[in-house]
Amino acid sequence: MARSDIIVGVEVGTSKVCAVVGESGREGTLRILGVGLAPSRGVRKGEIVDLAIATECVHDAISDAETNSDAEIGSVSVAVTGSHVRSFNSRGSILIPADRFEIDDEDVQEVAVKAREVNIPPENFFLHSLIQHYYVDGQDGVLNPLGMVGRKLEADFHIVHGVKTRLQNTLRSIREAGVEIDEVVVNSLASAQAVLDQHQKDLGAVVIDIGGGVTDYIVYENGAVHHSGVLAVGGDHISNDISLGLRIPLTRAEKLKTEEGSAKMGDAPPGEMIVLKNDAGFSGKEVEREMLNTIIHARVRENFELIRRQIEQEVPLHLLGGGVMLTGGTSLMRGIKDVAESIFEMPVHLAREVGVSGPKSILNNPQYSTAIGLVKFTQALRAEEDEPGIFGSMLERIGGIFRRK
Amino acid sequence: MIAYPKSGSPAAPQLSVRLIGLGNAGVHLADRVAMSGLAGVEVIAMNTDSQSLVSSICQRKVALGEKATRGLGSGGDPDVGAQAAEESMDEIRAAVDGAGLVFLCAGLGGGTGSGIAPLVAEAAREAGAIVMVIVTSPFSFEGRRRSAQAASSLAALSRLANVIVHFENDRMSELASPRSGIGETFAASDALLSACVSSLVGILRGGGPMPVGLSDLLSALGGGSAAGAFGRGEGTGDNRAHDALARALKSPLLDRGRLLDESHSVVVHISGPSSLTFAEVSAIMQELGKHIGENARLFLGVATQAGTADPVGVTILGNFATDGESRVPVPVAAPATRPRPEPQRDVPAVSEAVPQVVVHEDPKPLFPEPEPEMPSVAARQPREPKPAPKPAPVPAKVKQETLQFESVARGRFEKSEPTIVEGEDLDVPTFLRMRGKAK
């Protein structure tokens, strides 16, 4: 049985640090107790550039979460991202010794090791090896080869890796804030746990988490991860574009983006102006609404186009029946769904967390989906550990973690 | 001079084009046009300041008021300017004599430009030429007196000229980034005005399957209380037609095509290599149709050049009358103001009746600035004898248009690791990169 205990997910994002406290129930249910938030400083494009300040923010967020959820936090799971995080698909293959036919745990482990025997840069570090499916004697689509009879076992893995030192910065900011680290999970994988249910994973779906500094995306097909990636472009870039395009200060641009901006072009009546009131250090100005929307549209559109091109290299889009799920703070942008639909040419949904209970205000806020996903992911891992089932406790965990889905 | 007729076609009438740079600013612009080597345009520098004339590269120089000013300039006093002009009236008349089309460039606000420009325009009109005036008005920080001088001069010019293209120096800040040097900013403004001259000359020269004649241009842009919009864009590659139009429409002074909607007459000129297809022309016109009002009069011109590698260029000139009804006849005796003037002496225009392939040089590559085809305000002042109209022909709504090209603009990401994906620096705003690509 799963333990009933507290699981915390922390995301050190570019715009905010957020800690979500969940309580894992006896039957594997998950209830969100509370969140802690702190505006993020010292983080750019998802990576820490000022450790001392970032640590302070993490500390603030965690204490905030403790207060809000009335729980004591000793250890947390952490989401990592950044442009250095890369992924690829790799196949491992082993021959079963001649003296036996049945595939056992050791073989399953060995094939996973084989799949990882690929060249990655020396400074890089394996974050995840996610099993896609096994082949037994060339037979496709085997989900669990344990106990099957065969001479040859092959397995396809999706492997995620990143630069070790850059990942460690995020981890250090957590440790220095005084908590232990349970799991390290790449952002996109965590978000997907929060917003996709098993059915959607089987159908095939794309999750795009557009945060402040980076956009993480992940592609599920037949229940397994087939592609994932990080594009170091996020909501900050939109604000920056607005600031440069309209010649207004960045803070103004940020405000204008959230309050007035839309990613959809052609909606504003021609010549409609938005009046920016003057305040300290900023003399008032009028900006044209359509111009604002055009700037946003150009960026959002380009972002989706890049992602589409990268996904298409790995997975044909028409196989993804579950459509596209948008999450992350920037998915709150008006009109973003329409832009995504026009680029991906399939249904686009604004993601909502699934399979968890808790305050609606938390569950319906896409800014929290990565942290909530972390909690779910950690819970699932613990459940597997506590209950040596199908795979036994044979989960490969080198350094970070190795997990199926 | 305007065209090189193929054998067999009737001889094309010659149009003598002169560009007169008046005053320091005007001479400067004239130098620029002369440097760009606009073939077939006689560039004349005219100034009261002999220093400026000495350094000018124009073929022909006219010193004005050598007695009145002793070659020292007018000192910002239009009266001194007028005195100098009176003294040198014979030289002025000689300069415009025999011209079919005179471009008169001047910076208003000072003594020579403001004081003499109306007199030169008058002399040119008396000589039977079509007069297109390209003027700049002073910065507002130069004081009210200069503004007033510029305004009264502009009012006088608007009664005399056939077409006025008016550029406010206050808008100069829109032409370059705030951090660019002052020289660069002035150069951008010069480039803009000289691109305007080149485009107009280019249009008049362009023969091709569908030429736009001078009469069309005058009919569309001249005569009446009007203000002009101007945009020009070029495109190469597979999507050249669309790119060219998109760039032309992007002009701040077309207000991204919005001012076209208000224009009662629009001149569209499409130039391209011999590979220009009918489908491309039709695609441009269809797209443009969305921006042009239903009742607008449309003049379409298409010119092809002999080369095959040239870009497709789209030039759009619009006349959006602030009060379309109040068209008042030109008070000055001016045989050539009305559309389709009698084929008198030197004003025959490029006739549509001359089907010919014309080789005309493309003004574009002469201006290496990022946005050389940035439009200028072609402003036609009201002809009513009311007090000097303020030089503000373009509604305030365009003032926000600040999309300017900066070579590297990464803003807050200036110091962070660049995000290079598919060969592009994603930290640079998308709209800037898209604009770069459109070139």
Image (cartoon, grey):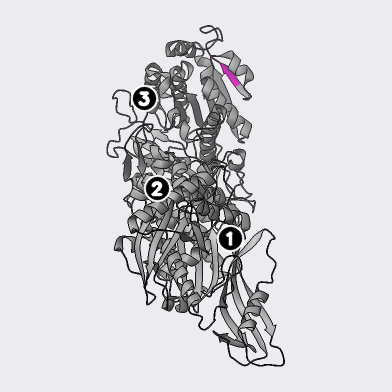
Alpha-carbon neighbours of circle 2 within 10 Å: few (<14), some, or many (≥20)? many
Q: CA distance from mark 3 to mark 1?
A: 66 Å
A245 relative to A367, above or below: above
View extreme (right): residue? A98
Q: Kindly report the secondary structure that dominates the magenta region of the rendered protein.
A: loop
Q: Secondary structure at mark 2?
A: helix
* Left or right, residue A290 beside residue A164: left
The subunit letter for the residue under badge 2 reads: A
Chain part drawn in magenta: B61-68
Mark 3 and mark 2 on one chain = no
A276 relative to A139, above or below: above
* Left or right, residue B376 beside residue A86: left
Position of the N terminus of chain B, as image quadrant, is: top right
Which residue in the structure is indicated by mark 2? Answer: A292
Task: Kindly indicate the quadrant of the structure image that contains residue A160.
Answer: bottom right
The subunit letter for the residue under badge 3 reads: B
Which residue in the structure is indicated by mark 1? Answer: A85
